[in-house]
Image: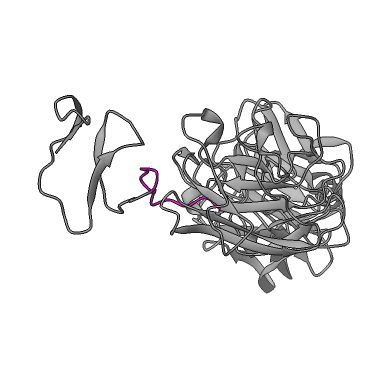
Amino acid sequence: MYLFAPDAETLIDSVSFGLQATDESYGRSVDAAPNWIHFPIATPNATNQLSPTQSLIINELMSFNSSVIGDNHSQFDPWIEIYNPNSDTLDLAGWFISNDAGNGRKFRFVFGNDSTKIAPHGYKILWADNEADQGITHLNFRLSNQGDCVLLYKPDHTLLSDSVCIGGLAANVSRGRRFDASPTWIDFIVSTPNATNQSSPAEFVLINEVQTINASTIRDNFNEFAPWVELYNPNPDTLNLEGWFVSNDPSDINYFRFPYDNDSTKISPHGFMMLWGDGQTQQGIRHLNFALNANGECFILSKPNSAFSDSACYGLIATDNSYGRISDGNPSWQNFVIPTPDSNNVDLFVGIKQLEEHSDIFLFPNPVKNGIVYLSRNISGIVSDLQGRELLIFKNENIIDVLSFSPGVYVIITSNQDHLRLIIE
């Protein structure tokens, strides 16, 4: 195909093309570009643009911004946050956005400007202020603080990427997805422009106890002895750690993030949560993406907005010992010879040792290796774990079969209230 000037001699432009599929077109990659491509969705009488298969999401809006965030002209205008949930950068160039369902082409993003690009899992703030002359992220319509709709179209102007309608909002309150890309919308008293959507609680969760070398203390859900961190909720209400962060790197406090919509992230009032520092996230949401350093490090817990909740720094901890608060939530820390995972912090070694000193019964062998432990005389009692759970009852015996027990530390409590430590290897 050739295009000639009116003199019928001067060649203005030409193109050669081969076989095309039905309803497919062949055109310049963007208007006037030197490169030609096939368009599965043709764009007759419109700008040439491939519509990506990926979608962008309207993530948060504020129609009455009196003091939250200023634009590039230091003006507090209504804003719309667009979120890219994809693993690739997406460019808004050629896309349309509107607050009028009858006119989806109300505003079109320009081509050839990096300001229209959104990084993977990134955000773009658009100023819905009807002042398009102030920059390419300023729209030619203004969000009404009495309620409005927003529609985002792909470059072919027919494929709707996302839309939302909101009611009136109070000053400095935003309406957004409960978390990025969530189907549920909520009001944010503290808005999160250009950041992850999350309501951060005022309450704190504490790091309560740490064990870096777990050779026989407690098994995880895969029956493995893994390093662990115990968290403690000192509050009278259940707290949900969805969206919270943990890290062992002070330069990257957002290294691991708890997922959303899973009951396993909830901590009951004055309750505990075990985190496995083994770098094996495929084993469950409480398994971290890093391994605790046996030589010592710092562990950091942050809220969803990256605000500090707690941290703990520790050195080398002996095998099967732990380092924890002397009591739950106490600011003072100590070494525990008998750890208390998923339970109240108390120095069982001191308490049991004092009780053992006043007992006329002793065990042998201790530690136990072959599954059989002998008492110095016949007596009745129970065997419990360190959480106080009763595991075995014996009556007028001096031989106890513990072959089925996992390696670890246990307590034998006799009918005379003697307390004896039992170590199984």
Q: What residue is drawn where x is 70% and y is 46%?
A: 128
- Residue 104 location (% of width, % of height): 54, 57
Left or right: residue 19 compared with residue 346: left
Left or right placement of residue 2 versus residue 213 in this view: left
Please tell me which residue lies in front, 238 or 88: 88
Q: Count the marks.
A: 0
Report whether 122 appears left or right of 185. Answer: left
Q: Toward the viewer: 62 or 285?
A: 62
Residue lying furthest front = 7
**Main secondary structure along the magenta-highlighted residues:** loop
Residue at point 15% right, 30% down? 8
Q: Residue furthest bottom?
A: 395
Residue 232 pos. (x, y %): 78, 51
Give 58 or 180, whichever is nearer the viewer.
58
Residue 56: x and y in percent read 52, 50
Is residue 97 a member of the stretch shown in magenta? no
Q: Whole-percent x and y of residue 343?
A: 76, 56
Question: 160 above or below 77?
Answer: below
- Identified at 31% across, 37% down, the residue is 29
Q: Which residues are magenta?
A: 46-57
Residue 20 appears in the rendering? yes
> What colouring style does the render use?
one colour
- In which quadrant will I find the N terminus? top left
Residue 337 seen in render: no
